[in-house]
Amino acid sequence: MKEQPNIIAFSIVLGLVLMALDAYVLGHWTRFVQRHSMNRWWHRSMWLTSLTMFSLYWYVVYRRHFFRMDGVDVVLMGLFTLWSMPKLAIGIVLLVKDAVRACKAAASWLMRRFRSTDSDVVASAEDASVMTRRDFFGKAGWSLSAVPYVLVGNGMYRTLYDFQVYELDVVIPNLPRAFEGMRLAQISDIHAGSFPDHRPFQEVRRILAMHKPDMIAITGDFVNAKPSELAVIDGELQRLHAPEGVYASLGNHDHYNTDAEHADLVKAIRSRGIDLLVNERRILTAGSERLVIAGTDNTGFKQRFARLEQALGDATEEDAVILLAHDPTFWEREVVGSPVGLMLAGHTHGGQLGVQLMGFEWSPAQYVYKQWAGLYAIGAQHVYVNRGIGTVGPPMRIGIPPEITMLTLRRPAADRGLA
């Protein structure tokens, strides 16, 4: 088994934190039910559901590595996510409410220390009025607690496979005139084990076919771990086609297996008609002009399999070079300053959680990865980070839909002005 991140401790800590959060929220719910003399099964049923869901969580953690989940594990983790994720929003609201209540209680205690006995009747009336308002807002608050469940449910069952096409022009240094306007499609992070069946990837293939790219690039993570996962999308993968070819690189998940399984995965990808570039390159030619398509194995996330010099071969600063490399951290680490004009990456999934609104985009992923989604540049060199089409961990996307990228290659403005 090749090296992979050890997240057992993370899984245990995360589980304990989520259990504490669940107990905190359900404790509030129990007190609300009891205060309003509701049937006790209103809170008992929630505690039983919590016990069931956390049993599923610990079962999945015990049975499979988070990064290796597929099939039934993904379904079970989905159920747990639907139960636990909304508690994050509810818990924050309850924490703020408890903090405000504690401050008010402290202020009230101080005021009572200096109140006269004659004002006690007025204070009692005020307290009764406060209790009435508190009951009203309490009922309204618990009614609104359904909103996070709606958002998470939408992220799991609608946004999850709501594939978005991102179209943009990218300037490639030294791009030959013959390749001006070439359309390159990129998909990334398929994670075939995360799909329930072939239909999501069938939709990806349909969208690609509709846009008629000249070339298709797949930037790693074909599977979560096992080569057998490819069977889910086998037919659709074989039908991918572009006039200039379908090229690919490997990702970190493609190494989460034994040497024999990894060899089987590489063989399986190539047998589907995909030109898998493992530290190698291909040359697209048009007359005497050429475009270099290179691909490295993964470096990043505790792996160092990339051999950039080997992949580039005899490519020089005079060449137009496009590099397929899964992890975007590889760009500043080794690619900047090389002959590569454009690097295509993935890996981040855009965080699978975030906000996209009127040109504004935010995700927790941006605090982990400097280049986390979209196009970035240093000088004349660019890297594009695709948000992925599959998922890892919770089968969910909230605010960050899966992505298919359509890039149109452009020559630098100075070159376009030449006759």
Image (cartoon, rainbow, N blue to C red):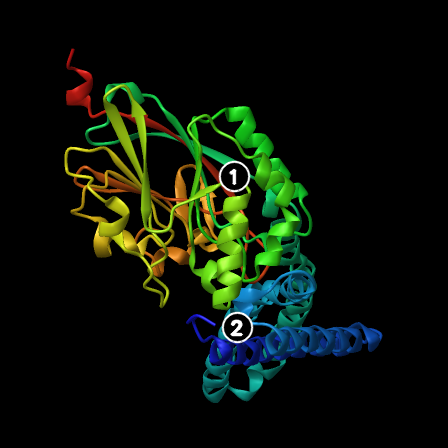
Which x, y percent locates residue 101? 53, 75
Mark 2 residue element? helix
Secondary structure under badge 1?
Answer: loop
- Find residue 359 and report its image quarter: top left
Q: Quadrant of the C terminus?
A: top left
Which of the two residues, 37 or 391, is positioned nearer the viewer here?
A: 391
Callout 2 crowding tier (Cα within 10 Å): few <14, some 14–19, many ≥20: few
* Residue 78, picture quadrant: bottom right
Identify the residue at horizontal 60%, vertical 72% (top origin). 64
Q: Position of residue 213 (x, y in %)?
A: 46, 27
Which of the two marks, 1 or 2, is nearer to us in this view?
Answer: 1
For the image, the number of numbered tags is 2
Amino acid at dot 2: Leu
Q: Nearer the viewer, residue 51 or 133?
A: 51
Q: Position of residue 18 (x, y in %)?
A: 57, 75
Q: Where is mark 2, residue-wise?
A: 95
Q: Is residue 10 above or below residue 263?
A: below
Q: In screen coordinates, is 214 left or right of 343?
A: right
Where residue 321 appears, x then y in whole percent?
Answer: 26, 37
Relative height, residue 199 to residue 41 (above, below):
above
Horizontal side of 268 relative to 56 (left or right) equals left
Disc number at residue 273?
1
Q: Residue, x 49% and y 59% (percent of image)? A: 263
Q: Residue at x 65, y 76 (%)?
A: 28
**Residue 381, placed above or below residue 352:** above
Tell me if residue 401 can be seen: no
Q: CA distance from mark 1 to mark 2?
A: 55 Å
Mark 1 neighbour density, 10 Å: few (under 14) some (14–19) many (20 or more) = some
Side of 395 relative to 416 (left or right): right
Question: As shown in the figure, which amino acid type bears the numbered disc 1?
Answer: Gly
Report whether residue 414 is seen.
Answer: yes
